[in-house]
Image (cartoon, helix red, strand yellow):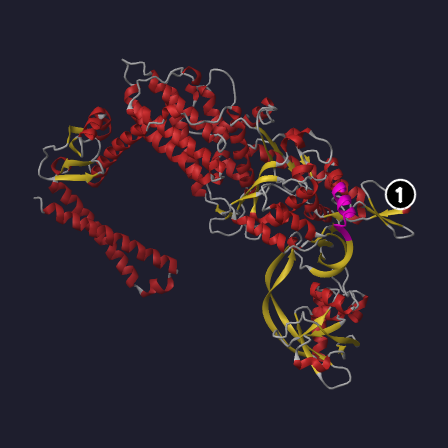
Amino acid sequence: MKREEMPTKYNPQAVEAGRYEKWLDDGVFKPSGNPEAEPYSIVIPPPNVTGKLHLGHAWDVTLQDMIIRQKRMQGFDTLWLPGMDHAGIATQAKVEEKLATQGISRYDLGREKFVQQVWDWKEEYASTIREQWSKMGVSVDYSRERFTLDTGLNKAVNKVFVDLYNKGLIYRGEYIINWDPKAQTALSDIEVIHKDVKGAFYHINYPVVGSDEVVEIATTRPETMLGDTAIAVHPEDERYQHLIGKTVMLPLMNREIPVVADEYVDREFGTGVVKITPAHDPNDFEVGNRHDLPRLNVMNLDGSMNKNAGKYADLDRFEARKQVIADLKEIDLLVKIEEMDHSVGHSERSGAVVEPLLSTQWFVKMQPLAEKTINNQSSEDAVEFFPPRFNNTFLTWMENIHDWVISRQLWWGHQIPAWYHKETGEVYVGETAPENEEDWQRDPDVLDTWFSSALWPFSTMGWPEESADFDRYFPTSTLVTGYDILTFWVSRMIFQSLEFTGKRPFQNVLIHGLIRDAEGRKMSKSLGNGIDPMDVIDEFGVDALRWFLANGSAPGQDVRYSEEKLSSAWNFINKIWNASRYVLMNVGDLTIDQIEIGEDQTIADQWILARLQTTIESVTRLFDKFEFGEAGRILYHFIWDDYCDWYIEMTKESLQDETSDNKTTKSILIYVLDQFLRLLHPIMPFVTEEIWQQLLSEKSSLVIADYPVVNDAYIKPEAVTAMNQLIEVIRGVRTIRNEMNTPLSKAVDLFIKANNEEVVELLKANQAYIERFCNPENLVISMDPETPQEVVSQTLSFAQILMPLEGLIKIEDEIKRLEQEQIKLNKEVERIDKKLANQGFVSKAPEKVVEEERAKREDYVSQLNAVTERIAQLETLL
């Protein structure tokens, strides 16, 4: 597109077409390879290959792209490494759902063929994600793309597992875990979402053996009582001292179970007696260990009851609950049902109610790893969080961490590198299979997805092999992610990196919030309020979306989606487009390498150059602190207000002067345009590149252009002060004209009473600007001007603006106009009063509508009072 071909309206589709492919062809996203440059690296939080990217992903990659684009322009040797996550349970569930529509299960296919189906799924959705990345303009180095299940990552995962096992930090044991009966796999604590649901406390009497006494217990899960192996009381509870050591009869099962004393029991809660089910509750498991109680599992892996549940075997757990309650009623042992809302764990992936279940799983012993991580946060190698409050969130989680269950009963994932001897049961753990492999059975389970993604910052750089990338770019510089996976992922990357590399995985962690809908609700399929970022791009363009996301909130805060703000972002870009078009159409063939900023500068020239330096300093400083919203606000006001509304307008008269070549003015117009396009480029890469190309005489790309730096020679505080005073005068005159309803086209006498001679000299030296922007009939600038008796004034800190009232308006005509306005406002107030006096309207209309009418009345009354007061003022002048 040539300068003269630039359309009058910004068209994002035309601007974006082919640009990303051109960047890729030119290889501008790759590291510079300059050994003298300081490295700066980011690894992308790998999206799951389970579907399309959502608006939260768009926000996340926009922030990363802004950081890496700026650092690249600043001369850093930058690497932004892309990749995707295999997302074990989530991806397997998606593929199983797809197969189910064809009447096929994974067991019909077998492990090998099923896994191949998942790989096919991965290739399809990985391609979609790359297309979406390209539409977002992400400047990643695709030649280094990684996947959490690729060969290199598998080698890293196996090494970490084996090393942790040999250090005694991975063990296999029988514990209560979170079990997903639908996906039939173990879950870690942070894969469980707690939701408030309607439930009940079921109060049940347990008969004491050898007496007529009963003890009352309460439970929310009566189906688990079938696996009770004791009841417990507090050892100091006087009410139950006589029962300790005795037995009670377990209702429905006719099995005697002991009464034990344990300090776990809260004697102030309920009856002070609790049932102990070691195979189905984590606290009961610990009580059972202390008292050597049997662990009786009464549930199958699919959530149905097993043979240990007696006559309830094969019933679904919730159906068994109903039957147990019915049977307890029949034998008169159900005391009462106390309905209540309570928090119930649900699987994050399948949505099923999670069942605490006794299971043999692989675990990571977390205490030693957590201690090392906590201590590191007090060292010089600490990870710095933005905003800092998330450091406390991180430390709190690490201080209260439990052992991490890492095995998953899935087929898609890193298979656990453990084998069991078919005859002896011996366990072998190794990076490669044992000798005589046919005598061994490999553990069929896979590792938790987070186990492999915890290694992401260093495994993607080639670790554990010798790697130039690892030596050059690790530790990485900045991680950008949402607060919702701080404990899922960020924490695990930190402790694994410290354990295996001896270094933090990244210097900074920038935490952003969630994208919410216009009403502040979390976007979800169930609410139907999700927004596809690709649809937004089709309507407004990617630069508008990126501008909205960059300026939506401060670090750590949520952002509300707003179509109005997206429209405003498009308008801002359109303003830049048209200002650039005007400049390019008025500077002839001048290019950036031909400019000459001479000494013949006007006060406006000096001012815009000085304001540019302030803007460069502020934007650079705020980017370094990741305060992009504030940086965007400063850029917006510099471009819209200073450059477009003031400087360009002030150059128009000069550009139209055919007696001068205006080389300095034209050069400054081009220079400032060039500089703010560079500042804007990390946020709006497409439109800035398109316009910037018009400034060049030789081909290059803004992607690798130098980022602006402050030029001290252009810092002139006196020019800024002087220009600000001129702007205040012009705004003051405009304010008076607006208040008097006097158009700028009407010439009016203007008197400026300056506070001192310095101001007089300044304003007289620049009175051409005052004449152009204020259109005075006569202009008088003095410390003591002679003015008519009736004037309208505007007081500034350095001067007073005085304008004769007679010149501004004809008093009689203005009174007539205001009287018509008064009549109109009176009618509006009367109309609303009638509406609000109508009880049918007030009682039947929504409260919001009634409040809106009251607010309108208040506004009309305020306007009416102002008009009435103005009429009274004017009548005194007749």
Question: Which stretch is magenta?
Answer: 158-171
Please name the residue shown 86% across and 48% down the image: 441
Furthest-front residue in this view: 379
Please name the residue shown 21% across and 41% down the image: 739
Nearest to the observer: residue 95 or residue 575: 575
Relative side of 724 to 464, left or right? left
Q: Can residue 486 be found in the magenta stretch? A: no
Please name the residue shown 47% across and 44% down the image: 554
Relative side of 440 to 69, left or right? right
693 over 137 or under it: above or below: above
111 over 472 or under it: above or below: below
Nearest to the observer: residue 105 or residue 158: 158
Nearest to the observer: residue 799 or residue 519: 799
Please name the residue shown 75% across and 67% down the image: 290
**Residue beneath label 1, please?**
437
- What residue type is disc 1 on? Glu
Q: Position of residue 542 (x, y in %)?
A: 51, 34
Q: Position of residue 324 (x, y in %)?
A: 72, 72
